[in-house]
Amino acid sequence: MREPTFTMGIEEEYLLVDPKTRDLIQKSPPTLLERSIERCHGQQVSPELLRSQIEIGTRICKDLTEAREALTDLRRTIIEVAAEHGLGLIAASTHPFARWAQQKHTEKARYAALSQEMQVAARRMVICGMHVHVGIEDDELRIDLMNQYSYFLPHLLALSCSSPFWEGQDTGLKSYRLTVFDVIPRTGLPERFDSFADYQRHVRIMVEAGIIPDSTMIWWDVRPSGRYPTLETRIMDVCTNVNDALCMAALVVCTLRMLWRLRSGNQRWRMYSNFLLNENRWRAMRYSTDQGLIDLGRGRVIPFAQLMEELLELIHEDADALGCLKEVEHVRHILAHGTSAHHQLRVHAEAVGGGATEEEALCAVVDHLIAETAEGTAGT
C-alpha cells in the first residue's frame, strides 16, 4: 500500500476575555472576525459555539516546519486583532471562573440546532479543544489505523491538559473539559469497524433515521474527517504554549506513521477493549502525567515518563523521516516543567500563598494564560 502523504492541519479554539475583569466577553465585536479573516490570508478563522470563542485552522502543511509557521502566525494575528479591539486571548480548554449560564451562543443555524437538540448539555460547553488532521488518503487504511491508534489517545490527552478549573473551583482534574463534552452523544472513544464500508453503514443508519445530517456530527476522540481524506484527532485539550501544541501535532503524525510502518511489515498494534482504554482515558483526565497509565500489555500502571520514553523510541524513525525530532522530544520538556494545568494550579497556589483573595488568584491565572498563549509567537 502506498505511503500516505502524512500532511497535517491544526485547528485550535480560543477564548476571548476582557483584560479588566478577566472574564469572558459577552459579545464579540462585529469587526473582530472580519479583521481576523482579512489578515490571515485565506487560512481558516471562524466563529465557534459561543460568542466568546474563536476558532482557527492552519492551511494544509506538508511537515512540522510549515505547521509551526502557520500556527504561530495564526496565533499571533488573532492576538493582535483581539488587542486592537481591547481584548485578551487565551488558549485553554476552560476559563478559570466564567459561568456557563452567562454565555451567549453564536447566531448560526448549526449552533441553534445543536442547542435545541442538546439543551443544557450544549449550553454548558464553555470548552475549547485542539484538533489535528493527518492526511491518510486510503479509506480502508484510515479506518484500520484508527482502530489501532485509539490505544495512544490517553497519552496525548495527559500531555495536553489545560482545564483544571471550572466556574472558580479547582476540580481536582487536570482536564475537566471532557467531563463537559462527554455528556453529549457520539463522543468519547471511537467504535471499532471492520472496514470503511462498515463505518459508512453505521453513519448511514444515523443519517437516514434523521438523527444527524452527516458524519461531521460525530465527535469521537478521533474520527475520519467528514470533509477531508484525513484522520482527525480531537482528544487533546488546547495547549496554552504553542510549542506544546506543536509537540502534540508531531506525536499524532509520528504515531500514525509508526502504525502504518508496522502494517507495511505485516505487523499490527494489539487492540484492547474500550473498557480498558477508558480507564487510561480517565487517568489522563484526572492526573495528567502525574500518576502513570496502565500498560495494557504488562497489565500494570507504569510511570508516565517511562511510557513516553518507550513511545519516543518507537517513533524515533518516523520523527526522523518526517523531520520533527525536535518537536516530539519536546515531550521531555513538558514532563519536566508540567502541562498548562500544572502551571495554572501553581500560579493560583502562589497567589493565594502571597495573600491574594480567591478572586485575585483566579485573575492571576487568567493573566498567566494570556501571557503564555502569546509566548513563542512573536517575530515568526
Image (cartoon, rainbow, N blue to C red):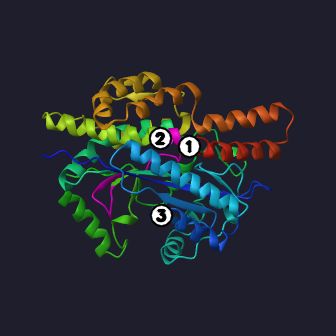
The residue depicted at 22 percent of the width and 64 percent of the height is: 201
Helix, strand or loop status at disc 2: helix
Q: Earlier in the sequence, mark 2 or mark 1?
A: 2
Helix, strand or loop status at disc 3: loop
The image shows residue 105 at horizontal and vertical percentages of: 60, 70
The image shows residue 160 at horizontal and vertical percentages of: 51, 40
Inspect the magenta stretch and tell me whether residue 244 lies in it. Answer: yes
Residue 30, compared with residue 69, is above or below; it is below
Q: Are marks 3 and 2 in contact (CB under 8 Å)?
A: no
The residue depicted at 68 percent of the width and 64 percent of the height is: 101
The residue depicted at 64 percent of the width and 63 percent of the height is: 52
Helix, strand or loop status at disc 1: loop
Q: Is residue 303 visible?
A: no
Q: Earlier in the sequence, mark 3 or mark 2?
A: 3
First to last magenta residue range: 224-246
Front-most of 118 and 265? 265
Q: Is residue 290 left or right of residue 234?
A: right
Inspect the magenta stretch and tell me whether residue 336 lies in it. Answer: no
The image shows residue 371 at horizontal and vertical percentages of: 67, 44
Q: Amino acid at mark 1?
A: Ser
Using a 10 Å C-alpha cutoff, classify the residue at mark 1 as few (fewer than 14 neighbours), some (14 to 19) or many (20 or more): many
| Residue at numbered disc 3 | 41
Quadrant of the rendered image containing residue 162: top right
Q: Are marks 2 and 1 in contact (CB under 8 Å)?
A: yes
Quadrant of the rendered image containing residue 148: top left
Q: Amino acid at mark 3?
A: His
Using a 10 Å C-alpha cutoff, classify the residue at mark 3 as few (fewer than 14 neighbours), some (14 to 19) or many (20 or more): few
Distance in Å between CA atoms under marks 3 and 2: 31 Å
Res. 157 mark: 2
| Residue at numbered disc 1 | 175
The image shows residue 232 at horizontal and vertical percentages of: 36, 53
Using a 10 Å C-alpha cutoff, classify the residue at mark 2 as few (fewer than 14 neighbours), some (14 to 19) or many (20 or more): many
